[in-house]
Image: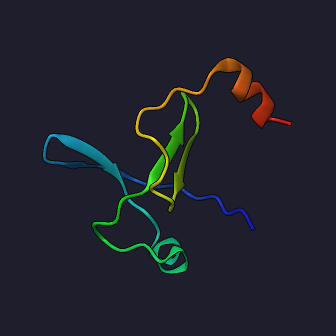
Amino acid sequence: MIKTGRRRIIRHGGSYGITIPRKFLELSGLKVGDRVGIVYNRVLLVINPNPELEESKDIKKKDRDNCSE
């Protein structure tokens, strides 16, 4: 099931963060301090509980086009 909602951007020291619903943390098994993977572009941010994704990896256009199929 996909859910939608609104989140607040917060400042944490010199960085920024996004609040995450408690229910998402409970269901995913994540805890404060855990590392997560993210996939993003200009309009979409996906938080993946799997931290195995490479940091700052750019996906080539050809690979992005295949993801939409």
Q: Residue at x 67, y 63 (%)?
A: 3
- The residue at the far left in this view is 13
- The residue at the far top in this view is 61
- The residue at the far right in this view is 69
Q: Looking at the image, is 8 positioned above or below residue 56?
A: below
| Left-right relation of 62 to 43 | right
| Left-right relation of 23 to 11 | right
Q: Which quarter of the rendered picture does the C terminus lie within? A: top right
Q: Nearer the viewer, residue 4 or 50?
A: 50
Q: How is the image coloured?
A: rainbow
Where residue 34 appears, as percent x and y from the top left, is 34, 66
Q: Looking at the image, is 51 positioned above or below residue 27?
A: above
Q: Residue at x 47, y 53 (%)?
A: 52
Q: Residue at x 13, y 47 (%)?
A: 13
Q: Residue at x 80, y 35 (%)?
A: 68
In this rendering, the count of numbered labels is 0
Q: Which quarter of the rendered picture does the N terminus lie within? A: bottom right
Where residue 66 appears, as percent x and y from the top left, is 79, 30
Q: Looking at the image, is 42 positioned above or below residue 49?
A: above
Where residue 19 appears, as percent x and y from the top left, is 38, 59
Q: Looking at the image, is 40 positioned above or below residue 37?
A: above
Where residue 35 appears, as percent x and y from the top left, is 36, 59
